[in-house]
Amino acid sequence: MNELLRTFGKALVSLLHPRMLWLTAVPFLISGLLWGVVLWFGWEPVTDALRVWLEQWPLTHWLYHFFGYFGIDSLRMTLAPFIVVALAVPLIVASALLLIAVLSMPAVLRHLSARHYVTLEARRGGSALGSLAQSCGATLIFLFMVVLTLPFWLVPPFFALIPPLLWGWLTYRVMTYDALAEHATADERRSILREHRLPLLVMGVATGLLGALPTLLWVSSAVMIVLFPIVAVMVIWLYVLIFVFSALWFAHYCLRALARLRADAPAQRASVAERAVPGP
């Protein structure tokens, strides 16, 4: 726990560095431009088509009757936008995370290596192709789990629990590989994943909870339909900022764990050698 808090503080300090703040700009501009155009031109047609499609389902009529019984008929207009948001957010989050992994993570590691881990040897056990394969594989599993659990996103308290867990798992899988790709060998990476699996999962869930904060803005903008495309751009920047912080946190934790692993390796080899020598 002390190591988690220590590296959390280091990541927060590193995030305030001008170079790190600049790293949030490129993924934000690419993702914001892409999704801004999609949402600006596609928001009304998609929500209108979905609203017409929902009218054909008996469950929708039951929900409308439920809203009317409690005097909240205004929620009828927010059902279709809410579903569009629920479908759009995972796609936006996944695209932002992929951009961070491809564009920002190498720069983050170079920055930390030059300032904090100068003596840590880079053994290059990973590659850009391996990072891409890891990111794409984890993203596909993430999107499959989103589709599988989507009905529960409308049911309390699952709407507050499932997204952070899924985003946390995705962040943990993607960030851990990228944090160790430059410095650790494949065996060292597997060893760290095995020994630190629980703390890394905790970090992933914690960053997933941080990622849930912009979701509140998504929901509020779905209620106020006119504001959704405008809020979308700001929320994408928040996602990028949170993911850059996550990259810094995972990099600090994983590189410190790698340094300790290498420092302990000679003592472990000596202990094994002593046990192998027969006694008199």
Image: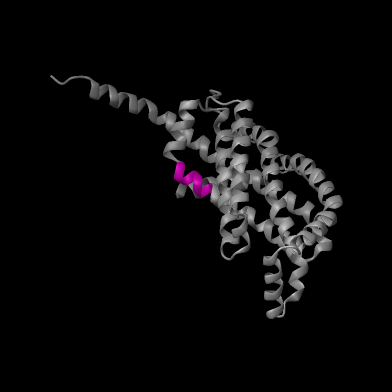
Q: Residue 232's quadrant in the figure?
A: bottom right
The residue positioned farthest toward the left in the image shown: 280
The residue closer to the viewer here, 94 or 86, is 86
Question: Is residue 201 on the magenta stretch?
Answer: yes
Residue 269 in sight: yes
Quarter placement of the C terminus: top left
| Image coords of residue 184 (percent x, y) | 51, 28
* Magenta span dominant secondary structure: helix
Nearest the eye: 201 or 110: 201
Q: How is the image coloured?
A: one colour
Q: Is residue 143 magenta?
A: no
Residue 251 visible? no
| The one of 184 and 70 positioned closer to us in this rendering | 70
For this view, does 188 lie left or right of residue 219?
left
Q: Find the residue positioned furthest to the right.
A: 41
What span is in magenta?
A: 197-203
Counting from the top left corner in percent of width and height, residue 214 is at: 69, 56
Measured from the top left, where is residue 97 in percent x and y?
66, 42
Q: Is residue 12 above or below residue 263?
A: below
Q: Residue at x 59, y 59 (%)?
A: 152
Give left or right: position of 13 versus 190: right
Left or right of 8? Residue 280 is left
